[in-house]
Image: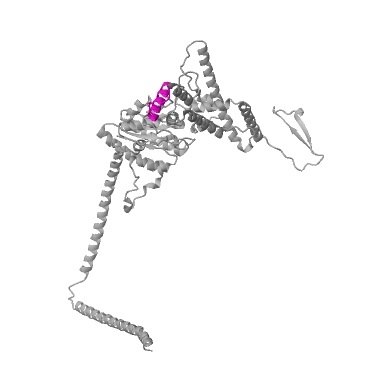
């Protein structure tokens, strides 16, 4: 009973204790409030006995003046601080851009300095030899080196050539020789926002995204779009080019690689002309040299319209002797001199890579194909894979469908026109080989040591295909290549050999003629109109008149009786 009573009394005691402490706290609060009232009353009494001559207005106005002075001082500090920050930031931006052209580190050179050490796998899962660090020296390398050294002021350059011919390799090699001093490179991209970022990375320019000018209510510079940002970057670069030209006495070099990746539309063409205008101005003043590289022909047709100081170089496949020497050197660097094959085997492999010839010389050389052959453990298998891949590419994109549906009429036109052009290239090649064979049989010396790749003028290709707009698509798909002289040839000898195998098949010509006939039939159906007469009775007749001369003729009348 006692324990139960003690259990009940314990919380009651704590509650009583808490209430007593709360009451004491309330009393203390009331006491403090009373003391505060006494102090305020005394202060009020003291203020009531002040003389009338003493006014409180000066005290009030003195506080307002202090506030105004403080506000003005803060505004002045912020204003001049903002001016100082903006001036410092603009100078810092120019210094950063100038650092992008300083000798030393360059992202492109760093990437190219680390080739594959273990080799890659081929289509059969066999590991190839490691990539050789030796670079093939093209005859255009001397020109590129002179450009990278800043000795070609007063011009800007356009390098045209098929994919894999070695344009970028020459430029990177030239940059490496000067340690990227005064040179930077930027890769193009179809998306202008991506190209904007790549250009900013190449120039070490952040497009004011790292600034704090938003504190001063400045407008966001991103509101104008990517092309306006690119124009701002070129303005900054122009100031740096002028400053650096005064210091070093030579122009800076800006390389825009793969400009064919720009969209061939209004935005892409306007951007290309925007960059070209800068190139023209810088070349005229000698403060900068711009270099453009393209795999396709359409950028040249756009830039040619306002070109004044532009120089164009067509980068083609290697000559026969150069191709053989390059393959031999690359093979030695990959597998060693002791294990290298004989010259006859390499010559045969090189012939197949540049494809069919009737002499022991080579017909040309694509660097990308030669590099792949040099690293291969089985050259014959690699050659067959290259040929099969190219043939599959042609058939997958331009395969003929004799009895095609009317919904794919445009695709049928595209395939038939393409094979008309490919067939013409194969015929030209056969005629050239036949002429050279006859020269050897007759005992005379042929006009050339090897059979060159067949070429057809651009205007003649338009007549062969009957659709001139298809040539640009073929160039974009790396089926043909067009040089600055408007001479059209197949992109590589590999493409020519693949087309020859398809054209030489027995069912190719009938299939092509069937597709052409089907296209004509579909076009005729598209031009045919059906007339339907309604509300005719069994005895009614409709008279049709076919008049091709414009003169009425009773003999052309036809009576159609309703059933």
**Residue 361 inside the magenta-drawn segment:** no
481 or 232, nearer to the observer: 481
Q: In front: 354, or 75? A: 354
- The quarter in which the C terminus is drawn is top right
Furthest residue in direction right, as rendered: 539
Dominant secondary structure (helix, strand or loop) of the stretch shown in magenta: helix
- Is 100 left or right of 560, judged from the image as shown? left
Residue 154, can we see it?
A: no
Q: Is residue 325 left or right of residue 31?
A: right
Q: Magenta part of the protein: which range?
A: 320-342
Q: Residue furthest front?
A: 338
Is residue 381 something one can see in this rendering? Answer: yes
The image quadrant that residue 63 belongs to is: bottom left
The verdict on residue 340 being magenta is: yes
x and y percentages locating residue 77 in the rendered image: 25, 54
Tell me if residue 218 comes above or below residue 447 in the rendering: below
* Quadrant hosting residue 42: bottom left
> Residue reaching furthest top?
443
**Residue 544 point in image, percent of width and height:** 75, 34
- Residue 198, image x, y percentages: 38, 41
Percent coordinates x, y for residue 223 in the rendering: 40, 47
Q: Nearer the viewer, residue 23 or 281?
A: 23
- Quadrant containing the N terminus in the rendered view: bottom left
Say whether residue 548 is left or right of residue 141.
right
Camera-side residue of 561 and 196: 196
């Amino acid at each position: 009973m006692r324990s139960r009573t003690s259990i009940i009394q314990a919380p009651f005691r704590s509650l009583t204790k808490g209430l007593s402490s709360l009451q004491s706290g309330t009393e203390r609060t009331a006491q403090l409030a009373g003391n505060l009232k006494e102090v305020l009353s005394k202060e009020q009494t003291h203020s009531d006995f002040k003389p009338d001559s003493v006014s409180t207005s000066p005290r009030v106005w003195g506080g307002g003046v202090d506030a105004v002075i403080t506000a003005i001082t803060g505004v002045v500090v912020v204003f001049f601080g903002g001016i100082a920050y903006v001036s410092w930031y603009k100078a810092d931006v120019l210094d950063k851009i100038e650092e992008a052209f300083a000798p030393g580190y360059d992202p492109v050179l760093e990437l190219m300095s680390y080739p594959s050490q273990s080799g890659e796998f081929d289509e059969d899962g066999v590991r190839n030899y490691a990539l050789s660090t030796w670079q093939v020296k093209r005859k255009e390398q001397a020109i590129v080196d002179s450009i990278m050294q800043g000795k070609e002021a007063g011009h800007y350059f356009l390098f045209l050539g098929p994919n894999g011919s070695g344009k970028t390799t020459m430029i990177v090699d030239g940059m490496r020789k000067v340690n990227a001093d005064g040179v930077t490179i930027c890769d193009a991209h179809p998306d202008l926002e991506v190209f904007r970022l790549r250009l900013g990375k190449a120039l070490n320019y952040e497009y004011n995204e790292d600034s704090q000018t938003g504190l001063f209510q400045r407008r966001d510079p991103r509101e104008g779009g990517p092309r306006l940002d690119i124009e701002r970057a070129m303005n900054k670069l122009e100031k740096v080019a002028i400053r650096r030209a005064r210091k070093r006495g030579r122009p800076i070099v800006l390389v825009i690689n793969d400009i064919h990746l720009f969209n061939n539309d209004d935005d892409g063409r306007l951007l290309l002309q925007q960059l070209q205008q800068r190139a023209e101005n810088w070349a005229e003043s000698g403060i900068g040299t711009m270099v453009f590289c393209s795999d396709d022909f359409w950028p040249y047709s756009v830039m040619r319209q306002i070109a004044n100081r532009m120089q164009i170089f067509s980068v083609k496949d290697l000559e026969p002797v150069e191709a053989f020497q390059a393959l031999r050197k690359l093979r030695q660097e990959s597998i060693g001199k002791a294990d290298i094959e004989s010259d006859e085997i390499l010559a045969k492999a090189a012939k197949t890579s540049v494809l069919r010839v009737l002499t022991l010389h080579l017909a040309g050389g694509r660097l990308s194909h030669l590099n792949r052959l040099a690293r291969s453990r089985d050259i014959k298998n690699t050659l067959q894979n290259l040929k099969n891949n190219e043939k599959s590419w042609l058939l997958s994109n331009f395969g003929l469908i004799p009895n095609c549906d009317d919904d794919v009429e445009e695709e049928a036109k595209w395939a038939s026109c393409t094979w008309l052009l490919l067939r013409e290239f194969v015929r030209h090649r056969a005629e050239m080989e036949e002429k050279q064979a006859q020269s050897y049989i007759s005992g005379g010396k042929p006009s050339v040591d090897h059979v060159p790749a067949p070429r057809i003028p651009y205007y003649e290709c338009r007549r062969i295909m009957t659709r001139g707009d298809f040539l640009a698509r073929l160039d974009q798909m790396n089926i043909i290549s067009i040089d600055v002289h408007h001479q059209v040839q197949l992109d590589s000898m590999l493409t020519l050999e693949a087309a020859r195998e398809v054209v030489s098949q027995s069912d190719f010509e009938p299939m092509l003629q069937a597709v052409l006939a089907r296209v004509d039939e579909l076009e005729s159906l598209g031009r045919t109109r059906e007339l339907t007469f309604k509300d005719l009775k069994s005895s009614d007749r409709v008279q049709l008149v076919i008049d091709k001369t414009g003169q009425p003729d009773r003999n052309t009348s036809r009576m159609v009786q309703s059933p």
